[in-house]
Image: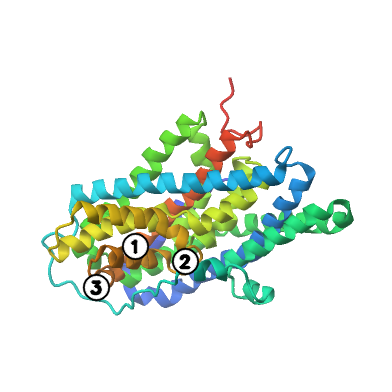
Amino acid sequence: MSKIPFWLRVLVAFALGTGIGVVFGEQAVPYVEPIGDLFVRLIKMLVVPLVFFTIAASIARLGDGALGENGGGKAVRLGVVTIVWFIITAGLAVGLGFAIGHLIEPGRGLTGLPLAEVTPKVIPPVQDVLIGIVPTNILKAFAEGQVLSVVFVALFVGAGLSALGEKTRNLRHIVEQGSQLMFKLTRWVIQLTPIGVFGLIASVVGSYGLESLAPLLSFIGAIYLACLIHVFVVYPILIKLHGLSVVAFYKGVFEAQQTAFFTCSSLGTLPVSLNAAIEKLKLNPAYAGFAVPLGANMKMDGCGAIYPAIASIFVANYFGITLTPSHYVIIALTAMLGSLATAGVPGVATVMLTLTLSTAGLPLEGIALLAAIDRIIDMVRTATNVTGQILIPTLVARENGLIEPESALIKKS
């Protein structure tokens, strides 16, 4: 079995799962759903300890000059540059979403779609989100999987270890060993991906049925087309402009893309994303160790940019509303900046759509129209998110000489 390429095992599992879902329909769900759920739980189990140990170890390395001289100041600058790139690529994504939305015109001519029972997400004020990053109880934050709070604690602990230097040498070794242990466990879980894919895709196809997708096929097609263009046209251009190998990048992130597609969870994919950035693309561990988790919370090109843009056009078309230039400006600004403000809030796609529709004055009932197909489109949205979450650290690492010389990203002369 180990001689069969990993991607082929996943592809076969996908085909088998689809076949089971089509043939047996909802009857298969009780048997295959637990398989997929178990795989997702295994991945999510790794997220909190992996984030903590990786970031704490990364920040502690700054005391050893892992980012060169003035490591602390350089880390802050890298963080700012990373967020700026998040916003730039989000702008490209929302522009692409508008273009594809107008090309396909999803929602035009549709009537009588059922409204699912969906309560729009309550969007907390930005200040509440920011204050909530600092936990009042560290153990509670870890137990409840509050990833942004875990990131904060890890940064705090890592900074303390770095400041104390040799006084905490043994503790720093333990944190570093914890990071290596989590990477090892991640590699083991990744090998279960084909089994998890089988259960997840069989459950999705069995639950929804292919025929139920027909009325919203143009919307699904628009989302998939925009995401694919963004991932396989826009991103490669950025990679090329930075003098990196496009083939090497996509080989390195392929497992993370697969995991994201089938689990529909950026945070759930984080262990695989970190493994891709550090082990396969050979980004500087001290930088990648905090940039990739940051992206998993704040970089949402699929859920936070492309989806709200196309969904807004769909809702406007369905309800017969003509979008004005001011609508487009509001939607674009909301999509570009909204995911930063809603970082760490569960259900980012629904939150972003709620935020976008309410800000632009469009009917919130549009959320209920799209709820039935959310899982289908969430697959490609999340794969887009995760690709961007690894891409931006790669570009920033290239700009700052933080890619290891042996990385396949750097073309050999």
The secondary element bearing badge 3 is classed as helix
Residue 263 in the image: state x and y as whole percent. Answer: 47, 62
Q: Amino acid at mark 1?
A: Ile
Judge from the rendering whether residue 289 lies leftward or rightward of residue 324; answer left or right: right
Q: Nearer the viewer, residue 129 or 226?
A: 129
Question: Between marks 1 and 3, how big is the CA–CA gap?
Answer: 19 Å
Q: Earlier in the sequence, mark 1 or mark 3?
A: 3
Q: Earlier in the sequence, mark 3 or mark 2?
A: 2
Drawn side of residue 173 relative to residue 187, left or right: right
Q: Nearer the viewer, residue 356 or 394?
A: 356
| Name of the residue lying farthest toward the right | 167
Residue 104 seen in render: yes
Residue 409 appears at what percent x and percent y? 56, 33
If the image is split into quadrants, where does the C terminus sit?
top right
- Pointer 2: residues within 10 angstroms few (<14), some, or many (20+)? some
Q: Which mark is residue 126?
A: 2
Which circle's residue, 2 or 1, is located before the other in the chain?
2
Look at discs 3 and 2 and give the one toward the viewer: 2
As drawn, the label of residue 168 is none
Q: Are marks 3 and 2 in contact (CB under 8 Å)?
A: no
Q: Determine which residue is flagged by label 1.
A: 376
Residue with the mark numbered 3 = 365
Which of labels 1 and 3 is toward the front?
Answer: 3
Q: Nearer the viewer, mark 2 or mark 1?
A: 2
Amino acid residing under circle 2: Val
Residue 46 seen anywhere in this rendered image of the structure: no
Which amino acid, mark 3?
Glu
Q: Residue 317, how many percent across, how many down?
A: 16, 60
Q: Position of residue 229 (x, y in %)?
A: 34, 43
Q: CA distance from mark 3 to mark 2?
A: 24 Å
